[in-house]
Amino acid sequence: MNNYSEKEYEIFSRLFILKEFTEENLKKLSNLKIGIIGIGGIGCPLSQYLINSGIKELTLVDGDIIEKSNLNRQILFDLNDIGKKKVKVAKKKLQLINSDCKINIVDKNINKKNIFELSNCSIIVDATDDWNTSKILNEHCVKNYISFLYSSVIKHDLQIILFDNKKQNEHLCLNCIFPNKNEVDLPRCETVGISGISAGLAGLITAQKIINFSLNLSDETNILTVSDGK
């Protein structure tokens, strides 16, 4: 049996009548544990739509506070949240959607010393806009056979790819595609800008890829999705 309450069946009633949400897939869905690293322009819509899609447990990782410049794309936050911790506000907002979901928060930026806090995750999503963090997450997921999804957006452009990291598969990871060993001088949102809509699209596509992959609805592994929001 899956782990959904009667209240949750009512919340997700329009979703669960879809033919893809069989009893077997509902059991899979209810047992997923998704780690989202970076609660920004991608992480906000991603976390919201995962909870809206019946995911019952998230781990949110971010050490930042909410600033006014976040509000054009970080849709869990508003003017009343300025100066507050992102993960704490995000947890409160997400539990207003489904009070039965479990939201774990890590109020710090991830590094090699604290990455063990992601050890129970089924899938780890990198939405950080930080290349050093991306490398750390990729290495951790490869070594521990954890599925890893890289999602990024700059200006109007997004790119997303999921690696399943299973033991028996031929090796392919983020480092294979972008093999530079050191930090690179990448464009950043604060210097070249970012479209809130494109960040939202990245979050939504990432959420759908997680559902497709986890419920075996379609093959999402090792496919780089790129899009220009314009």
Image (cartoon, rainbow, N blue to C red):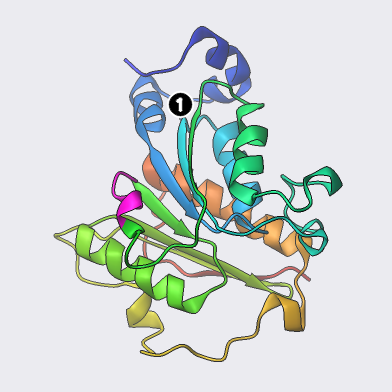
Q: Residue at x 40, y 47 (%)?
A: 213
Q: Secondary structure at mark 1?
A: loop
Q: Residue at x 54, y 19 (%)?
A: 17
**Please, what is the three-letter code of the amino acid marked with disc 1?**
Phe
Q: Is residue 167 magenta?
A: no
User: Which residue is the site of mark 1?
Assistant: 21
Extreme residue toward the top, this view: 6
Residue 33, quarter of the rendered image: top left
Extreme residue toward the left, this view: 168
Extreme residue toward the right, this view: 79
Picture layout, residue 99 above or below residue 177: above
Residue 164, quarter of the rendered image: bottom left
Quadrant of the image containing the N terminus: top left
Which x, y percent locates residue 130?
A: 53, 74
Which x, y percent locates residue 29?
A: 41, 31
Quadrant of the image containing the C terminus: bottom right
Q: Residue at x 65, y 27 (%)?
A: 97
Which x, y percent locates residue 24?
A: 33, 24
Q: Can the viewer see residue 214 in this picture?
A: yes
Q: Can the viewer see residue 217 in this picture?
A: no
Q: Is residue 119 magenta?
A: yes
Extreme residue toward the front, this view: 83
Magenta residues, start to end: 116-121
